[in-house]
Structures are given as C-alpha cells and as structure tokens.
Amino acid sequence: MNTGRQAPMPTRRLLLGSIATLCAGIAAGADAGSASLTVSGDVRRSMTVDADALRAFPPEAQASFRVSREVDGQAQPGSTLKGVRLLALLEQAGLAERDRYDWRKSVVVAIARDGYRAAFSWPELANTPGGAQVMVAYERDGAPLSEQEGPLALHAPGDTRTGPRHVKWLQRIEVRVLRD
C-alpha cells in the first residue's frame, strides 16, 4: 500500500547502498566474465570475437590436441582442447602491409586480462610446424574452459616448454610490423 510517504532515512540509505553494491558487482562480473578477444594493431580489419564466433570458423581453421601430463612420475588423465588456429584468426584480420616483406618482420603479442604477454613472429606462425599448432582455445573435453583458464586461452602445443606461452584469460592479440 502506497501512503505517499518516503521511507525512513536509514532504510533509504540501506536500499541505495544495496543498489550501488549490486551495480558494482554486475559491472565487475561483466568484466571478469568477458569472453571476447580483440585482434588489433597493424591489421587491415580490427576484430572482436567470442567463443561462439570461433566455433563458427570453418573446419580447416579449427584445431584440437590432446593434453597429458605426469605428476610425480604418474601419468594423469589427459584432456582434449579445441580452438581455432591463431594464424587463421590473423589471416581473417589481415596484415596491414606497406610492402610485400612486412610479414617477415611482424610480431604477434597475446595479452591476458592480467597483462601477461607471450610473443610470436608471423613467420614462425606461418612457416613452422610448431607455429601452425598455436591456437585460441575455447573448449576442453567438450565443455567451456574452466574459470581458472578463462573463456579463451592461447596454447602453443608445439613448444618444448608449453607453460611460458600459455596465455590464460586471453583478452587481446596485437600485431606489430617492426619498421625502421
């Protein structure tokens, strides 16, 4: 029943405080749960993709690999990662070349939400078996990636030591042509 009176001051303050806390929580949650990846820098078309857009890439752009590991000499159950080859994503964005040799002096930097970075050269991605395996993962064992890994992650399974260039919570890919 509306009597036309305002709520007592402490109740109104509590209500306004609760609304402010809820709004801050939604904003923080939206940022933390952001599942998009931006490709920018020296590209013809900057683009932003999410897991659904990556799933829509053609089959030849898709990649998967089996991850297994040992802990204290004991084999652990493996898992299968699925994603899109990084080079396929970069080819869709296109390199903004000034001359035909710019691809030879281009670097690709994968950046996580927390600022962690891993670098690749464009020739490495385009001309080596290990580079061809680098992928933006969106799924593990048929389910979205876990909270610990983020909605999207970058994996370089061809690396001898895969940890240094494993980028959890992948947020951005920046392409730079190293010019004089």
Image (cartoon, grey):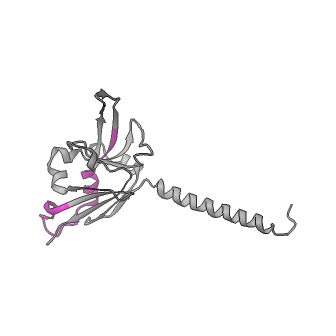
Closer-to-camera residue (135/119): 119
The image shows residue 172, relative to residue 157, as above or below, that is below
Residue 137, horizontal then vertical, whole percent: 34, 45
Farthest bottom residue in view:
180
* Residue at the image position 75 percent from the left and 66 percent from the top: 12
Point out the stretch of residues depicted in magenta: 81-106
* Residue at the image position 15 percent from the left and 62 percent from the top: 105
* Residue at the image position 60 percent from the left and 62 percent from the top: 23
Q: Is residue 160 magenta?
A: no
Residue 42, horizontal then vertical, whole percent: 25, 66
Farthest left residue in view:
101
Residue 16, horizontal then vertical, whole percent: 69, 65
Closer-to-camera residue (120/58): 120
Residue 121, horizontal then vertical, whole percent: 18, 56
Count of picture labels: 0
* Residue at the image position 13 percent from the left and 68 percent from the top: 99
The image shows residue 34, relative to residue 138, as above or below, that is below
Quick check: 72 left or right of 123? right
Quadrant, the N terminus:
bottom right
Quick check: 158 left or right of 77? left
Quadrant, the C terminus:
bottom left
